[in-house]
Amino acid sequence: MRIITTESYQEMSLEATKIVAGQVYLKPTSVLGLATGSTPEGLYDNLVAVHRTIGLDFSEVTTFNLDEYIGMAPENPQSYHYFMHKHFFDLVNVRPENIFPDGCAEDVPAACKAYDKLIREKGGIDLQVLGIGRNAHIGFNEPDVKFEATTHKVKLDDETIQANARFFEDEEAVPRYAISMGIKTIMLARHVILLANGPEKAEAVKKAVCGSVSPAAPASILQLHQDVTVIVDRAAASMLPEEYQHGAHEIF
């Protein structure tokens, strides 16, 4: 595991951009797993800028979203399908046939199996981008989810619902269920980058980087992945050992 601690959100986003852009440049047919939410917005803004200024080509890239609310139509502004098109896909040359979890599928378990099957058919995920929840969830894999879970239906924790309420009219409008890429599916990615910023993520980052590996902190499983890069700003790194709060380090 590598950890890169930056001075700001902008620097965090830039470091992530270097990794993702490098992946696409070196392997134009890359398969990317992509996170939504406010944390990776800077990354997507930068990738759009690289595409427009130097022509980074996404036309052969395949993408998979981490998650989607169940029962939310793709055209709903709060759906993750809508988010990715608004912030990234509609601004670069990713082909429209990229697939997302279908939150409106009538048979959710079948849709989950089909999603994992499609990932396998595409050769697996080369680079997975993750954020982290305040309770150390990754994707919508809440605490105590089984590590061996593949893509599945999840019930959102109260803490996650409260955190996501800022995107809705009120807390009652936040969906209670979602489809999420499972821990096992995430761990099969060849390279994972985890992004976090702000003091509210500091405890979760500590659990992910140097806490006990336990389903109580889903992100802690990343300590066992063969190739993980954690990129955080100083505020999110504030609860890590002092030596990890500056610069770049190989932890183990």
Image: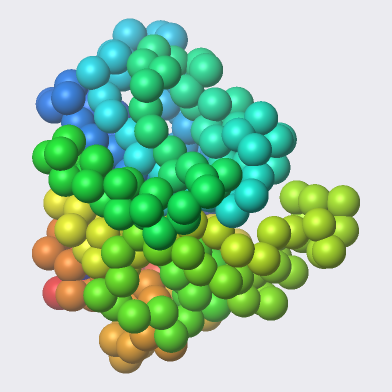
Q: Residue at x 83, y 64 (%)?
A: 172
Q: Is residue 120 visible?
A: yes
- Vertical comparison of 107 with 23: above or below: below
Q: Nearer the viewer, residue 230 or 64?
A: 64
Q: Residue at x 22, y 47 (%)?
A: 117
Answer with left or right where residue 198 lies relative to residue 245: right
Q: Is residue 50 visible?
A: no
Q: Position of residue 129 (x, y in %)?
A: 36, 48
Quadrant of the rendered image containing residue 181: bottom left
Quarter of the picture holding the C terminus: bottom left
- Vertical comparison of 212 with 235: above or below: below
Q: Nearer the viewer, residue 114 or 235?
A: 114
Answer with left or right where residue 153 lies relative to residue 121: right
Q: Residue at x 15, y 39 (%)?
A: 121
Q: Position of residue 93 (x, y in %)?
A: 39, 13
Q: Tell me, what colour scheme is on the image?
A: rainbow
Q: Position of residue 251 (x, y in %)?
A: 20, 73
Q: Nearer the viewer, residue 99 or 126?
A: 99
- Vertical comparison of 65 with 159: above or below: above
Q: Residue at x 80, y 51 (%)?
A: 168
Quarter of the picture holding the N terminus: bottom left
Quadrant of the rendered image containing residue 165: bottom right
Answer with left or right where residue 204 lies relative to residue 20: right
Q: Residue furthest front?
A: 106
